[in-house]
Image (tube, grey):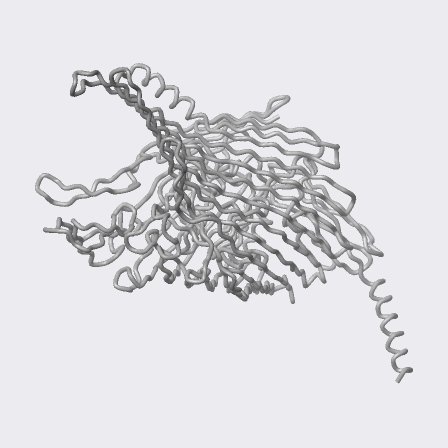
Amino acid sequence: MSHLRNILLILLFFYRQVDAQEYATISGYVRDSTASENLNSATIYDQNSQQGTLSNTYGFYSLTVPAGKVNLIVSYVGYQPKHLKLIVRKDTTLNFRLSSRNQIQQVQVSVKKKDAVTSLPGHQHITMQSIEALPGFLGEQDVLKSLTILPGVQQGHEGSAGIFVRGGSPDQNLILLDGVPVFNASHLFGFVSVFTPEALQSVDFYKGGFPARYGGRLSSVVDVRMKEGNKNKPETNLTFGIISSKFTHEGPITKGKSSYLISARRTLLDLLVTSAAKINKLSSSDGATVPGLNFYDFNLKLNFDLNRKNRLYVSFYTGGDRLFSRFFMNDSYTGQENHEITSKQTTNVNLHWGNKIGAIRWNSQIGDKLFLNTTLSSGLFQYTIHNNYKQVRTEANERTKQQTDIKYNTLVNNNKLQFLFDWYLTNQHKIQFGSNAEVNWFVPGKQEISRNGETPFKRGNGWTSNKALALFADDHWTPGEKLTIYGGLRYDFYLLQGEWFTYLQPRVSLCFAPSPKYSINLSYDEMAQPIHLLTNSSIGLPSDIWVPAIKNVPPEYSRQIAMGIKTAISSNLNYSFDSYYKTMKGVINYKAGYSFMDIYKDWGNLVETGTGRAWGFEQTLNYENRRLKWWLNYTLSWNNRRFASINDGKPFPFKFDRRHDINLGLVLKLSKETELSAIWTFQSGQAATVPQMDYQAAGPTDYTTTDFITGKDIEDPDRIQYIDNYNGNRLPAFHHLDIGFTFKKQRASYEREWKIGVYNVYARQNPYMYYPYTNARGYLKYRQISIFPFVPSISYHIHF
């Protein structure tokens, strides 16, 4: 027996020696040659062995090839590919630096053609160059708005930055900035997102085929990555626009080894509006209002090469909005005893809301095939209201003062530690696995009221928390040239009010390409969401409140299956067709008669849970050559909800159930320095509840009505409505045409760029909201409010 064991050990040793001689592993990093930025999803391919791989988020790759002659091609969209021939006898480290070149459309087309056929189902890797080429809203290029041109992605109200993905709602989108959740991703009540384009590197968007490392939301993932900072030379970007002005500066701390990036953005509209209002106040004798609204963003990123295999990153973001208004009222009259009475009243209303995000990330290369990313992060969103009322009353030389302070506060704080491994086991198996632990803190809403300096009266929901632990693993398996399988499993553990909830979530996607021009895709995903958003509307108002799942309002859960085909019709023309079916349970809605103002009650008793169902068909046709790129996207979809107390328990259309969604766009190079872009958007009207009868009651009644504007139920003892079908009506269709021109000029020491655009070229009066009124004959009618009929914009950008 021992003799046989010795023979087996000798054979195993011999096999390992032969194997080591026959194969070698090439590993390293793919980076930008100018700024030394890591390039995510770059392709590394050996033409001799026909083996290939992709770089990870931090540019790391590992490729095992037969020892001997190797013919490598390294490519990335928008960069000059690099060719390298060499002889490899042992494990080798090779770092590649690719040069950006704007005039390589042929390479871009060929790479995109391959990606269009074999890419992960439901995934889009978006570069900032493609976002900057689109027409901006009020001169602002926007990450979230750019996603609405994709099939299956719809915007909410006009101008809003919130997105609705495959029947979901905005709270079901996991929006990440350098891996940290962003709970409120918009400014100006939803019109602008918090992401400054000049500070960003890329965006990965998932609406299906979710990798197991992502969890906590049902509908989509928007993974935004900041630039790392130029390690070789300083760079500065300045932008002056109608909505905001921006400053971004980056450069080396130690050349080639460490770098920094600083970016700041602020709106300037409030300076003009507030100044004009103050002038009006000086000329007004009886009273005036001084309003103001502003927002700001600040990004900071540092990165250090500790040694050849270890890197340290530090990221920070803070941003917020402030809405304030000061009301002044002076009054003078004669009292009962002919005393002159004067009254001076001042009301200050201040609303503040915003995010703070911080992360420390350590990258470590462990050998030639294993890469570890360790992240410690924290994200905070806070919303506060402070109302202060003062009155000074003078009568017969006696002054009396009254003061009332009302403070309202809500917040959510996410703290996470994550370990993420990339293991290049073989060329056929790229495995990603890891774990993360989270502690989430919430203040669902609390209020303090004090009068004349007395002890404040407090009410509302205090601090609460939940804890989460996740284990996950993915295998990117390529059993052959024609088949790619992504198999993943995520196991979530949630500690909610002292009780553990567990969710095992399988994820699987496959891509079968019988020919280089044609592929079939299939994906199945299960997702869990341990937090809810109490919302009064979908406009993105800060009154929306994040709350944790609890025992009687458990986590939301979804299952989605998607199938599709992709084909390259020609070298320039691609077509794709996708279908999906998704079920959701645990979605929430306010019970009749309640809203976010009921903070003195336990929020869990204000809502009820229901189910959702969404399905649809998505089509994409896109064309690209050296000068012209155009696309046509069309989505046909259905989106329903079901709650026991609404519509007699029968399913009804979700407010943003839009049957048809069409997006037609183009980007045309008119010359080397001039570019034209245009987008036409069409969406079916959103669902609305219009009562068939609405009249005053003869006396008080115990009756609940539905407010047409907000879609919320309201207790009204003097009004009776008869509703035949909840959300059974449709508002007019929504459509507009946007165009933009870009004029670039390269000077000796800098590059300047003018952007001129028009939003809603033909001045379509799209409905923003409706409100009811009674006409002269006593009939109930509705008036439409439109806010963006025709909006020109201009911005100036300089880079040096």
| Nearer to us in this view, 658 or 648 | 648
| Nearer to us in this view, 756 or 768 | 768
Q: Residue at x 61, y 32 (%)?
A: 262
Q: How many marks?
A: 0
Q: Which residue is drawn at 14% across and 42% down?
A: 774
Quadrant in which the C terminus is drawn: top right
Residue lying furthest left: 777
Let me know if residue 633 appears in the view. no
| Nearer to us in this view, 406 or 609 | 406
Q: Left or right? Give the position of 644 relative to 775.
A: right
Let me know if residue 449 appears in the view. yes
Residue 672, above or below 590: above
- Give x and y (percent) for residue 44: 69, 52
- Give x and y (percent) for residue 443: 46, 47
Q: Quadrant location of residue 467?
A: bottom right
Q: Quadrant location of residue 648?
A: bottom left
Q: Left or right? Give the position of 662 relative to 570.
A: left
- Give x and y (percent) for residue 615: 39, 61
Quadrant in which the N terminus is drawn: bottom right
| Nearer to us in this view, 799 or 402 | 402
- Give x and y (percent) for residue 235: 64, 29
Q: Left or right? Give the position of 780 relative to 498.
A: left
Residue 473, above or below 755: below
Residue lying furthest bottom: 1
Q: Which residue is drawn at 33% across and 43% down?
A: 735
